[in-house]
Amino acid sequence: MEIPENIQEQLNQFQQLQQQAQAVTMQIQNVEVQIQETEKALEELKKTDENTEVFKQAGTLLIKVEYSDALADMEDKLETLQLRKQTMARQEERVMKKLEEMQSTIQAAMQGMGQ
């Protein structure tokens, strides 16, 4: 039995959406790792004395920075990463909902063919 062109097109869109969902999930995992690393660095920074020399990595160089600047930078970075994660989670949610809708539509169309 041949699959009609419109159903085949829906199946192709469904596969593309699955790939998009996978990509978003991988990006979220990547951001989660960055959040964990940033939280750990921030925790270590807060353990040190304000008079301790602090260095920031810039490419292959380490540059001396003020403690307060380093602390502010780390806190800003953490906030940005957390916002990015929230945005990506909403995007993932939308893609998953769309996948469920498409799956139902495709299943209904395939069942209609069988009858």
Image: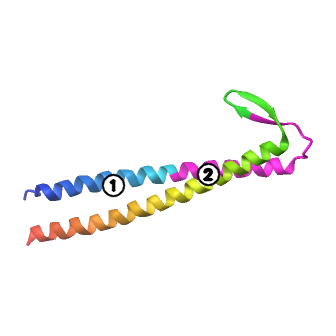
Give neighbour class at mark 1: few <14, some 14-19, many 20+ (Cα, 10 Å). some
Q: CA distance from mark 2 to mark 1?
A: 25 Å
Query: Is residue 87 rendered to the left or right of residue 39?
Result: left
Q: From which residue to which does the magenta span run?
A: 28-56
Kindly give the residue lying farthest to the bottom in the view shown. 115
Q: Which quadrant holds residue 11?
A: bottom left
Label 2, secondary structure: give it: helix
On screen, residue 49 above or below 8? above
Question: In terms of sequence position, does the residue under pointer 2 or pointer 1 come before the other?
Answer: 1
Q: In the image, what residue occupies the spot 28% across and 64% down?
A: 102
- Where does the C terminus fall, quadrant-wise? bottom left
Please give the residue where the numbered disc 1 appears in the rendered image.
Answer: 17
* Membership of 54 in magenta stretch: yes
**Residue type at numbered disc 1:** Leu
Q: Main secondary structure of the magenta part?
A: helix
Q: Where does residue 79 sit, x and y in percent of width and height?
A: 66, 54
- Where does the N terminus fall, quadrant-wise? bottom left
Q: Where does residue 77 sit, x and y in percent of width and height?
A: 67, 48
Which callout, 2 or 1, points to the residue nearer the camera? Answer: 2
Q: Are marks 2 and 1 in contact (CB under 8 Å)?
A: no
Question: Foreground residue, 48 or 66?
Answer: 66
**Residue type at numbered disc 2:** Leu
